[in-house]
């Protein structure tokens, strides 16, 4: 089980997931709540799906409390210490996750997919019930987002067991269907 540290938080924040195992990682640190107090043991790293403020607001608190560094797509961002390039593998918990550059919501957006674990961290690309990331913010672009969702569909296995998203509940019942629905819905708007 991968807990959401931001569960039940009533503040403007993203979800923040704690992936435990060989390498304990926080995926997106959230914002506007005390994430450090929700981490029971230690953290080896922070991995970011993208650098919107609701996903990185707590990065410095986690860095300071656990003396860790942060990985993300764009090392020019102040919240990113190390670059994750498209196609890289990053160890999170007990599995290697493939980095998929998926812009459209934000230029530095990535999804993280472990085929062996059948787990996807989708950030703000897609959500439950066919929701998809906003494209009306800086760096947002609907056509780019659609291409990113289609790329995700071409990489992720239909037997995907869990999709952890940037906002709202994780999807554990046929999440591949939610990605397909997001691909269709994004084309309608």
Image (tube, helix red, strand yellow):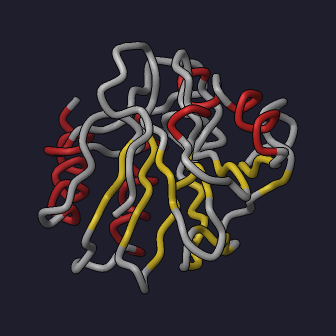
**In which image quadrant can residue 63 be found?**
top right
Coordinates of residue 176 in the picture (x, y in percent): 22, 65
In the rendered view of the protein, which quadrant contains the N terminus?
bottom left
Residue 176 versus residue 72 in the image, above or below: below
* Closer to us: 54 or 105: 54
The mark tally for this picture is 0
Residue 89 versus residue 142 in the image, above or below: below
* Closer to us: 55 or 9: 9
Residue at 64 percent of width and 22 percent of height: 57
* Closer to us: 120 or 139: 120
Coordinates of residue 91 in the picture (x, y in percent): 65, 73
Residue at 31 percent of width and 58 percent of height: 163
Coordinates of residue 59 in the picture (x, y in percent): 70, 32
Residue 10 versus residue 87 in the image, above or below: above
Residue at 66 percent of width and 69 percent of height: 23
Residue at 43 percent of width and 64 percent of height: 151
Residue 146 versus residue 131 in the image, above or below: below
In the rendered view of the protein, which quadrant contains the C terminus?
top left
Coordinates of residue 32 in the picture (x, y in percent): 54, 15
Q: Residue furthest bottom?
A: 116
């Amino acid at each position: 089980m991968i807990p959401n540290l931001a569960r039940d938080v009533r503040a403007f924040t993203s979800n923040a997931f704690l992936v435990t195992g060989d390498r304990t990682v926080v995926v997106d640190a959230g914002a506007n709540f005390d994430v450090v107090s929700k981490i029971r043991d230690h953290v080896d790293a922070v991995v970011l799906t993208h650098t919107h403020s609701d996903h990185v607001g707590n990065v410095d608190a986690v860095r300071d409390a656990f003396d860790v560094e942060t990985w993300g797509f764009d090392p020019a961002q102040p919240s990113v210490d190390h670059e994750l390039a498209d196609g890289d593998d990053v160890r999170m918990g007990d599995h290697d996750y493939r980095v998929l550059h998926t812009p459209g919501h934000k230029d530095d957006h990535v999804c993280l997919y472990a085929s062996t674990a059948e787990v996807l961290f989708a950030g703000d690309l897609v959500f439950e019930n066919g929701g998809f990331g906003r494209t009306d913010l800086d760096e947002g672009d609907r056509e780019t987002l659609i291409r990113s969702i289609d790329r995700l569909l071409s990489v992720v296995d239909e037997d995907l067991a869990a999709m952890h998203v940037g906002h709202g509940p994780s999807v554990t019942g046929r999440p591949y269907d939610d990605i397909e629905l997001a691909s269709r819905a994004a084309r309608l708007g």
